Image (cartoon, helix red, strand yellow):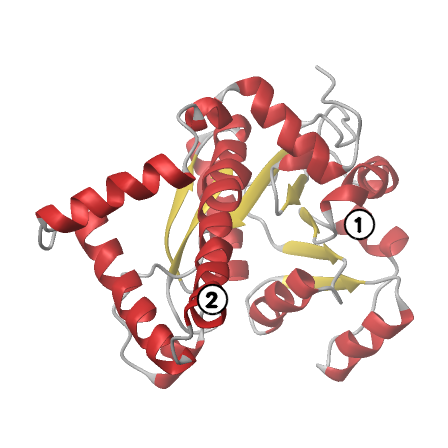
Amino acid sequence: MPAELKTVTVIGAGGKMGMRISANFQNSQYQVFYCENSPQAREKVAAEGREISDPESVVPLSDVVILAVPDIVLGKVSQAVVPQMKTGAILLTLDPAAAYANLIALRDGIEYAVAHPCHPSVFLQRYTKEEHDDAFGGVAAIQHVAASWESGSDAQRSELAKVINCMYGPVEQVHWVTVKQLAYLEPTLVETVACMVGAFMKESLDETVKHCGVPEEAAKAMLYGHIQIALAVAFRATNPFSDACMIAMEYGREKIIKPDWKVIFEEKELDTVIARMLKIDKINR
């Protein structure tokens, strides 16, 4: 791996994540090449003033090759890209599922990394309109990143962190974990649990309006405020839940949560959900 990472190629530069990270790379110190197959997506890249490059020409020149493509095609795309990479270069993916499932093409002399944004915290102090508007991160609101790179020296990791800080910036900290730990963070913690709970709260809001006849604006006002206070109390102990609230919470757990819900943290369950996400029969070890 080069002592300093200078050249980056983004494969899938016209996709949702590709457009986001390309915007941050565009005015950086890195030499960046943008690759995209879809004609419609290529138009979006060109509209932002980014020149489209041919992967066969630029991948062999790159210190870092970023695969900003959907999980379900990472295996196929990596099989085409990895043989073209120069020795010591880094293949960087944005989600852990394919790496955990061993779908990424392997080759001696190539380093492998995964880096996924944590998105701006619900507890983040925001001062400007741009920060308030940036719910996803990568524009104005600061965020953390969870990343996996299980080889190399501290100096090399520091160089890779600079690339990650640029593509997801502004970034407060990169947290280094294993691929398996990153898979437990996403999907298990944040998609299987947090995103599911978020969607469930929206369903509950709709049911309150539909079934109980509560005016929608009143229901939204009550729920949105209580989401904030519930998170503050649960995660930051700003105030204790009242005794009556604790009783209602326990009733909710009895009615809604399965007693064995923690089974989702078992490895076989992690394998199951990732296999479903990647639309494969099973994880092969």
Q: Nearer the viewer, residue 101 or 39?
A: 101
Q: Is residue 167 left or right of residue 83?
A: left
SS for dot 2: helix
Q: Is residue 193 visible?
A: yes
User: What type is the residue that disc 1 sits on?
Assistant: Val
User: Where does residue 254 sit, x and y in percent of width and height?
Assistant: 34, 35
SS for dot 1: helix
| Quadrant of the image occupied by residue 50 | bottom right
Q: Nearer the viewer, residue 257 or 76?
A: 257
Residue placed at 24% from the left, 56% from the top? 230
User: Where does residue 64 sit, x and y in percent of width and height?
Assistant: 66, 47
Q: Is residue 134 left or right of residue 229?
A: right
Q: Which residue is mark 2?
A: 211
- Quarter placement of the N terminus: top right
| Quadrant of the image occupied by residue 271 | top right
User: Where is 85 relative to 117, above or below?
Assistant: above
Residue placed at 70% from the left, 39% from the top? 277
Bin the neighbour count of mark 2 within 10 Å (Cα to Cα): few under 14, some 14-19, many 20 and up.
few
User: Where does residue 161 sit, x and y in percent of width and height?
Assistant: 47, 47
User: What type is the residue that disc 2 sits on?
Assistant: His
Foreground label between 2 and 1: 2
Residue placed at 33% from the left, 67% from the top? 223
Q: Which residue is mark 1?
A: 59
- Quarter placement of the C terminus: top right
Residue placed at 88% from the left, 60% from the top? 54
Q: Is residue 111 visible?
A: no
User: Where does residue 281 sit, x and y in percent of width and height?
Assistant: 80, 25
Q: Nearer the viewer, residue 48 or 179?
A: 179
For the residues labelled 2 and 1, say whether their Cβ atoms are less than 8 Å apart: no
